[in-house]
Amino acid sequence: MPKRKLDAAFCLTAHCEPGKKKTDWYDEIVQGFMIECRQSGGKTYYLSFNEGKKRNTIKIAAYGDVTFDQAKKK
């Protein structure tokens, strides 16, 4: 679960860490906002949050279907 300041430039070049099937890059500023990078090259924006004792994750959109700013605003 690596963290860093997510921006459009980073998301463009973000990739899955070697030897893993997927890497979730979490934003340091907006809690729970992340981009999932898969080994296949696919990327998806998500919002992850706690609701009581349960962890929920909501898909925002596939990378490329919306801009970074649109995904972060949602």
Image: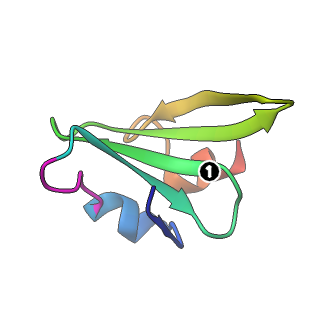
* Above or below 16: residue 48: above
Task: Please say whether residue 23 is one of the residues in the magenta stretch.
Answer: no
- Number of residues whose C-alpha sits closer than 10 Å to that of mark 1, classed few (under 14), some (14–19) or many (20 or more): many
Quickly name the residue at label 1: 33
Magenta residues span: 14-19
Horizontal side of 8 relative to 69 (left or right) equals left
- Residue 28 to residue 51: above or below: below
Left or right: 46 as drawn, with respect to 44: right
Q: Report the side of 17 relative to 44 (left or right).
A: left
Tell which residue pokes out farthest to the front in this image.
Answer: 53
Locate residue 2, reporting x and y percent. 44, 62
Residue 48, x across and y down, in percent: 65, 39
- Classify residue 18 by image quadrant: bottom left
Location of residue 64 (image quadrant)? top left
SS label for mark 1: strand
Residue under the image location 61 percent in, 47 percent down: 70
Screen quadrant of the C terminus: top right
Amino acid beneath label 1: Phe
What residue is shown at x 86% (from left), y 30% (from top)?
A: 52
Q: Please say if 40 is above or below 2.
A: above
